[in-house]
Amino acid sequence: MATVAAGGPFSMFEGVDRILTVLEGELTLAVDGAAPVTLGPKTPPLPFPGDVPVAALTPPRPVTDLNMMTRRGGAAASVQRLRLEGAETIAPADWTLVLSRSPGVEVEIDGETHGIGLDDAILIAGGAAASVHGRSGAEVLIASVRSTRSPHV
């Protein structure tokens, strides 16, 4: 998670894929010469290559975002926003980060329940069976990473 208070170019990362998710505020990005897109707390996460020009326009107030970066060819990531309406099963992955954007969220991993509060996170490794639940309307982000490398034989 990071705070963006001023506009400007993003750092370039060769061979890296990025996913930017705005948690608070609004951020307008121009990615590789495409029309600018405005991201906010209700918009889907924005995937883009880390090795293309990206610039942020100066936001009207500071923005909090979550930025996932994975090495292309080594791992693939996804980020999903969920509004809870009961228990949600979490798809297994090599690594999954559950970030609570609401108080009183619980994550069950292999039958053991863990409470997490606002802006707390829990890491689930190795494809463990997991689910998340909280009050109706509670928001969580599920960030998953899967290795794309072939295992050594």
Image: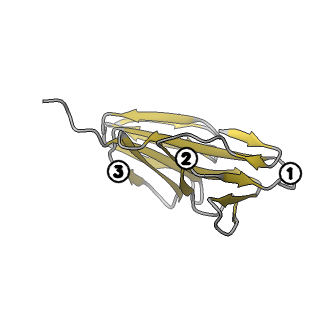
- Look at discs 2 and 3 and give the one toward the viewer: 2
In the image, residue 131 lies at what x, y percent? 40, 47
Q: State yes or no: discs 2 and 3 in contact (Cβ < 8 Å).
A: no
Q: Residues within 10 Å of mark 2 (few under 14, many from 20)?
A: some
Separation of marks 2 and 3 at Cα, in angstroms: 29 Å
Separation of marks 2 and 1 at Cα, in angstroms: 27 Å
Residue ID for mark 3: 91
Q: Residue at x 35, y 50 (%)?
A: 91
In the image, residue 52 lies at what x, y percent? 58, 51
Q: Secondary structure at mark 3?
A: loop
Can you see residue 18?
A: yes
Q: Secondary structure at mark 2?
A: loop
Residue ID for mark 1: 61
Q: Is residue 144 left or right of residue 69?
A: left
Q: Residue at x 31, y 36 (%)?
A: 110
Q: How is the image coloured?
A: secondary structure
User: In the rendered view of the protein, which quadrant contains the N terminus?
Assistant: top right
Q: Residue at x 79, y 56 (%)?
A: 57
In the image, residue 137 lies at what x, y percent? 59, 60
Q: Earlier in the sequence, mark 3 or mark 1?
A: 1
- Look at discs 2 and 1 and give the one toward the viewer: 2
| Depth check, front residue: 77 or 55 | 55
Q: Is residue 93 left or right of residue 32?
A: left
For badge 1, the amino acid type reads Arg
Q: Earlier in the sequence, mark 2 or mark 1?
A: 2
Total numbered badges shown on the rendered structure: 3
What's the mark number on residue 51?
A: 2
